[in-house]
Image: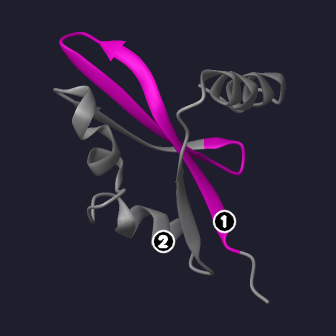
């Protein structure tokens, strides 16, 4: 069975006059996007749209899965893990 890469996506907070959405996989930020409204974040990172799918497929040709994180504790755990490994920018 082939294991697909999980790409964790989440709202990285307000940035200027909009919101930043980030996609993390294998201890690295692989995509970022900016949305004018919070309600568009999922689509603007590729959940329910084709945005970023070429990027994800080129990095993970064996397969990938987008996972949306809502829980702030879970998001902070992932960010802390990346910072400890010095892979999160």
Going by the image, does 12 lie left or right of 78?
left
Q: Quadrant of residue 53?
A: bottom left
Distance from the alpha carbon under mark 2 to that under mark 1: 12 Å
The reply to whether the magenta stretch includes residue 25 is: yes
Tag on residue 58? 2
Q: How many marks?
A: 2
- The picture places residue 46, in percent across and down from the top left corner, at 34, 56
- The picture places residue 52, in percent across and down from the top left corner, at 35, 58
Q: Quadrant of residue 4?
A: bottom right
Choose between 5 and 88: the one closer to the eye: 5
Where 44 falls versus 13 (above or below)? below
Judged from the image, the secondary structure of the residue bearing numbered disc 2 is helix
Query: Mark 1 highlights which residue?
Result: 5
- The picture places residue 71, in percent across and down from the top left corner, at 60, 29
Q: Quadrant of the N terminus?
A: bottom right
As drawn, the residue found furthest toward the bottom would be: 1
Choose between 44 and 86: the one closer to the eye: 44
Q: Quadrant of the C terminus?
A: top right
What residue is drawn where x is 43% and y is 29%?
Answer: 11
Tag on residue 27? none
Where 74 falls versus 64 (above or below)? above
The mark lying in front, picked from 2 and 1, is: 1
The reply to whether the magenta stretch includes residue 8 is: yes
What residue is drawn where x is 47% and y is 64%?
Answer: 56
| Residue 71 seen in the figure | yes
Q: Give the magenta range.
A: 4-28
Where 58 falls versus 45 (above or below)? below
């Amino acid at each position: 069975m082939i294991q697909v890469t999980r790409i964790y996506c989440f709202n990285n907070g307000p940035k200027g006059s909009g919101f930043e959405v980030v996609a993390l996989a294998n201890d690295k930020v692989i995509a970022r996007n900016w949305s004018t409204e919070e309600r568009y974040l999922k689509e603007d990172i590729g959940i329910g749209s084709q945005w970023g799918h070429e990027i994800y497929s080129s990095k993970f040709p064996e397969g990938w899965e987008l996972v949306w994180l809502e829980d702030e504790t879970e998001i902070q755990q992932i960010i802390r893990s990346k910072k400890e490994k010095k892979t999160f920018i």
